[in-house]
Image (tube, grey):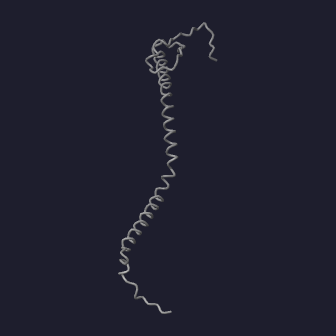
Amino acid sequence: MDFKFDHISLANLFENGHNYFTFSIMGMLIVFAGLAFISIYITLLPKILNLPNIIKADRKDKKEKAAAGTTDVKDSELLLAIAVALHLDQTGGGNYEKITWKRHEDSVSSWLTAGRMRALAVRSHLPDRRS
């Protein structure tokens, strides 16, 4: 077995009218781009897998904000009723009073509640039904 290496030279890269040097550089660039893409994908994989949770959280936040918008009207009406009760208690003569509130459909503004409330003094000769 007689091995000779006299046929190995740089001239073989440009033989038969082909530029094998350019082909090898292009092949290395393609492999490098593929490996870079794979490493970026592996780096971003936890964030990609977390996307459904983020989307669900955004939807939940939107639902909570929508629900908070409907409860804000009820909360403002409740605060208005408490403020009226405190005002009537402070301006009244210290008598027990019964405050009635006419319920209507959900209104947009608390200012539309004018005329929906009355303060009725509880008579001492009437039986107390609160107990």
> Is any part of residue 122 visible from this angle?
yes
**Front position in the image: 92 or 40:** 40
> Is any part of residue 96 visible from this angle?
no
> Where does residue 38 sit, x and y in percent of width and height?
47, 61
The answer to whether 45 is drawn above or below residue 76 in the figure is below
**Front position in the image: 47 or 130:** 47
> Where does residue 123 sit, x and y in percent of width and height?
57, 8
Q: Quadrant of residue 28?
A: bottom left
- The C terminus lies in which quarter of the figure? top right
> Where does residue 2 sit, x and y in percent of width and height?
48, 93
The answer to whether 114 is drawn above or below residue 7 in the figure is above
Residue in the image at 52% along x and 46% along y: 53
Residue projecting furthest to the top? 125
Marks counted in the figure total 0
Residue projecting furthest to the bottom? 2
**Front position in the image: 103 or 126:** 103
The answer to whether 77 is drawn above or below residue 16 in the figure is above
> Where does residue 95 sit, x and y in percent of width and height?
52, 12
**Front position in the image: 27 or 32:** 27
Residue in the image at 48% along x and 59% along y: 42
